[in-house]
Image (tube, rainbow, N blue to C red):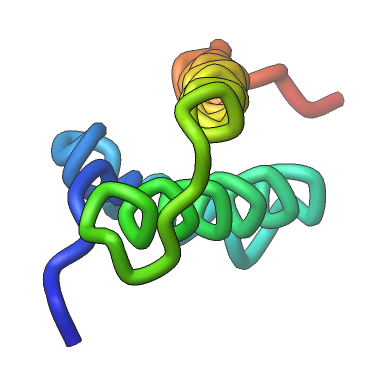
Amino acid sequence: MTHVPHQLSAEFPDKADQIAQMEQSNAHFAKLAAEYDAVNRTIHKAETNIAPMDELAESEQRRKRAALKDEIYAMLTKPAQPTS
């Protein structure tokens, strides 16, 4: 299997442990991370001509990946809420 660029652990290397922990403990985060991975694999397949797509579709996938990455980053950097 080839290396897929832009994986979350590579995008946020200082947060790799936190990503793994949140994928286990936060269902919404896990869903976002899984969606990010799926979109990222689709883009990688298009870039490597394994599953080519037209330029407009690839551009839309890149925008979707960026939006997911922004949402994931916001969750990773959100201050912890105190528990009562």
Front-lying residue, 32 or 57: 57
What's the residue at 56%, 22% (across, down)? 56
Instruction: Please give left or right for residue 21 compared with residue 15 in the image.
Output: right
Front-lying residue, 38 or 14: 38
Q: Where's the C terminus, which quadrant? A: top right
User: In this picture, is 34 found above or below 11?
Assistant: below
In the rendered image, which quarter is residue 44 located in? bottom left
Q: Position of residue 43 (x, y in %)?
A: 41, 47
In the rendered image, which quarter is residue 78 located in? top right
Q: Position of residue 52 (x, y in %)?
A: 42, 55
Instruction: Please give left or right for residue 49 compared with residue 72 in the image.
Output: left
Front-lying residue, 17 or 58: 58
User: In this picture, is 35 found above or below 11?
Assistant: below
What's the residue at 27%, 48% (across, down)? 47
Instruction: Please give left or right for residue 59 compared with residue 45 in the image.
Output: right
Q: Farthest residue in the front direction?
A: 54
What's the residue at 60%, 32% (across, down)? 57
Q: Position of residue 83 (x, y in %)?
A: 78, 27
User: In this picture, is 38 found above or below 16?
Assistant: below
User: In this picture, is 51 found above or below 54?
Assistant: below
Q: Farthest residue in the right direction?
A: 84
Q: How many marks?
A: 0
Q: Position of residue 66 (x, y in %)?
A: 48, 20
Q: Farthest residue in the bottom direction?
A: 1
What's the residue at 18%, 87% (across, down)? 1
